[in-house]
Amino acid sequence: MYIPVYRMMAATRPEVLGLYRKIFRLARRWKSSLGLEEETKKEKQYIVEEARKLFHKNKNVTHPDTIRQCIEEAHARIDIGLHYGIPYPRPTHLPPMGLAVPHSKILRTQEKLRKQAKPVYLKSYDEIS
């Protein structure tokens, strides 16, 4: 069954706005795992700035699959932040590129595998940095 894009966007709009509000409520209640007031302020500011930056960057996204990926990434980052007590994305530990010669087939294969192995919560983080 085909669902027109404008209907899909209308269905996800409340979900996205609710997610945006959820992130700001989370930032308001956030407490640093170190317990320091200065660190708590920095982390709250990071959460608010990161949310604004990513939501502003993705405000013109219209493709339903891309919207769904952005929503999944936001939920993953919220869950990881709450679980570990840090708002910053967790780094991934991927194997180094090895000794592949530049412009070789092996290097392209390694780069492809690294891109596929990247967790959902780091997709937009790398695009911004």
Image: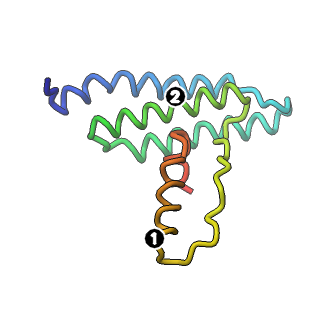
Q: Position of residue 77 (x, y in %)?
A: 57, 34
For the point 53% across and 38% down, the residue is 51
Residue of label 1: 105
For the point 66% across and 31% down, the residue is 81
Q: Position of residue 23 (x, y in %)?
A: 55, 28
Q: Is residue 51 above or below residue 109?
A: above
- The answer to whether residue 110 is left or right of residue 10 is right
- The answer to whether residue 87 is left or right of residue 69 is right
Instruction: Answer with mark 2 or mark 1, whichever residue precedes in sequence.
Output: 2
Q: How is the image coloured?
A: rainbow
Camera-nearest residue between 104 and 22: 104
At label 1, the amino acid type is: Lys
At label 2, the amino acid type is: His
Which secondary structure, mark 1? helix
Q: Quadrant of the N terminus?
A: top left
The span from disc 2 to disc 1 (Cα, nearest Å) is 36 Å
Q: Residue furthest front?
A: 106
Residue of label 2: 75
Q: Is residue 120 above or below residue 104?
A: above
For the point 51% across and 69% down, the residue is 107
Q: Is residue 22 above or below residue 99?
A: above
Label 2 environment density (alpha carbons within 10 Å; few <14, some 14–19, many ≥20)? some
Mark nearer the viewer, 2 or 1:
1
Label 1 environment density (alpha carbons within 10 Å; few <14, some 14–19, many ≥20)? few
